[in-house]
Image (cartoon, coloured by chain):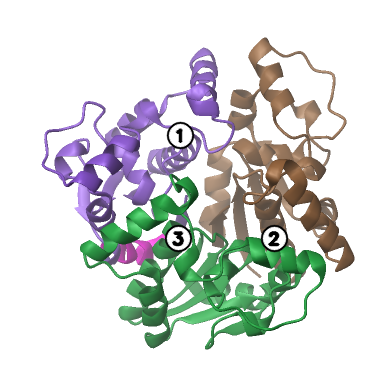
Chain colours: A purple, B brown, C green
Amino acid sequence: MAKKTIIVFSGDLDKAMAAFIIANGAAAMGDEVTMFFTFWGLNILRKPEGAKVKKGFLENMFGKMMPRGAERLGLSKMNFGGLGAKMMKYIMKKKNVNTLTELIENAKALGVRLIACTMSMDVMGIKKEELVDGIDFAGVATYLAEADEANLNLFI
Amino acid sequence: MAKKTIIVFSGDLDKAMAAFIIANGAAAMGDEVTMFFTFWGLNILRKPEGAKVKKGFLENMFGKMMPRGAERLGLSKMNFGGLGAKMMKYIMKKKNVNTLTELIENAKALGVRLIACTMSMDVMGIKKEELVDGIDFAGVATYLAEADEANLNLFI
Amino acid sequence: MAKKTIIVFSGDLDKAMAAFIIANGAAAMGDEVTMFFTFWGLNILRKPEGAKVKKGFLENMFGKMMPRGAERLGLSKMNFGGLGAKMMKYIMKKKNVNTLTELIENAKALGVRLIACTMSMDVMGIKKEELVDGIDFAGVATYLAEADEANLNLFI
C-alpha cells in the first residue's frame, strides 16, 4: 500500500476524467489517494444547483462565467462551444464508460480524499456552500505533507 | 538505474516534444522509461497514412477531426491554424534539433516502452491498426504498477 | 528535508502562480526546490524591458509575440485578450494575495533554484541577457539528476 496525490488544476472534462480514473484505479488497489482541487479544478466540485451566498460584484460575475459542476465542463480540445463535450459523453454512454459524476461518486465510495484549496476558493470567490458534500478544505501545506508521504504525485 | 513513467495526455507538438526529450534523456542515462499515451496523446502515435478499419459514424468523424501522427500536431499556444507549428519546425530544422518523428524513433531505439491506453482508444474510436508499430496496449492498472516502481512520474 | 522539482512548461499566469505557491511552500518548510523553466515557461523569466540582442528575423518575430515577464502573462482559461488576467490580478490585490512578481522574489529569497532550459532558449531564440538575474542555465540532464534525488516532481 502506498499513498498517491493528484493536484487537479484543470477544470476540463477530459482532464478531470483522467484524474479520477487514475485516482479510483489506485484506490481500488488499496492505495490512499488524495486529490487536491485548485483554480479551475474547483469547478468540478461545484454543486450544479448553486447555493445562496453573499458575493461581491466581481466574484459573482466570475462565478457565473465558470461551469457549475461535473456535468457542465468542456473539453480541453475540440470543445466547439460544448458540442465536443456532448459528443464525448454520448459516446461514453454508448460504450458503458463511467461518467465523471459516477467517477466522483466512486472516488468517494473508495475513500479517495477530496480537498478543495482554500486559497483558490478565496481568489475565485467560491464559498464552501457552493461545493459538493463530503470534501475537505485545506491549503498548500496540507498538500505538501501528503505528497511527502506519497510515491506518486501528479499535476493535472 | 531507476524507472520513470510519463503519461502523455496532450496531443500538442510542443508538449509531446518535451515528453520525449525527458524520456530519451532518462533512457540514454540507463533508466527504464514507460510512456503511457492517453486521450489526445494517442494522436502522436497514429499512422499518418491511416488504416482501413470499420468505424461508426461518430468514431469516423472524431477520427477525421483529430491530427494523424507526429507531423500534423499543432502547438499548445500560438498555433495560428498550424502556422506556429510550421514556424517552430522550420526553426528546429535550422538549429539541428531533432523533430518529433526522430525523437519517437530514438525513443524506440533506446528501449523506451510506448503504451497506448486501451480505454481512451475505445472512447475515441481509435483501432490498433491505426497506431504505429512497436507499441504496447494496456490500461490504468499497468500504468499504476509501473508508477509504483518508478522514482519520476509526470503527467504531460 | 527533501528535494522537490517542478518543470514549468506553461507560460500562463494561473499555472505559474500555482507552481510558485507550491515551490515557495516547500522551500519555507526547509526543502530544496528546483524549478526548471522550459518552452512557454521561459516567458515568466523574461525581463519586462527586454535587452539589446542580435536575433534573426523569425527569432525576433517570435520574441515580439510572446509576453515579456510575469506582469504580462495571460490566464490559461477565460483570458479574453488579457481582461481575465487583469481581473484576477485586481481580485488578488484586494485579497492581499501575493502577485506573481512577488512570488518570484520570495522564491529567490527562500533559495529556490530557478533554471532556464538552454535547449528551449535556443529554439525560441531567447538570449541569456533577456532573462532576469539570479537564475541558472542548464539542460535536461541537469533536470534528471535533480529529479532523481527528489521526492516530488511535477510538470506544470
Image spot of residue C60 (x, y percent): 74, 69
Which residue does the image show at 20% across and 31% down from the upper left?
A50
Would you say the magenta stretch is mainly helix, strand or loop? Answer: helix
Please name the residue that numbered disc 2 is placed on.
Answer: B23
Give, as a three-letter code, the residue at label 2: Ala
Chain for disc number 3: C
Whether residue A1 is visible here, answered yes or no, is no
Q: From mark 2 to mark 1, how far is it between C-alphas?
A: 27 Å
Tell me whether marks 3 and 1 sit on the same chain: no
**Mark 3 or 1: the one toward you:** 3
Whether residue B14 is visible here, answered yes or no, is yes
Nearer-the-camera pick, A34 or A45: A45
Image spot of residue C15 (x, y percent): 45, 58
Please name the residue that numbered disc 3 is placed on.
Answer: C13
Give, as a three-letter code, the residue at label 3: Leu
Mark 2 touching mark 1, by CB under 8 A? Answer: no
Question: Is A145 colored magenta in this rendering?
Answer: yes
Describe residue B92's horizontal placement relative to residue A135 as left or right: right
Mark 2 touching mark 3, by CB under 8 A? Answer: no
Question: Is A39 colored magenta in this rendering?
Answer: no
Helix, strand or loop under label 1 = helix
Residue A101 occupies quadrant: top left
Please name the residue that numbered disc 1 is placed on.
Answer: A13
The span picked out in magenta is A142-152
Q: Residues within 10 Å of mark 3 (few under 14, many from 20)?
A: many
Q: Residues within 10 Å of mark 1 (few under 14, many from 20)?
A: many
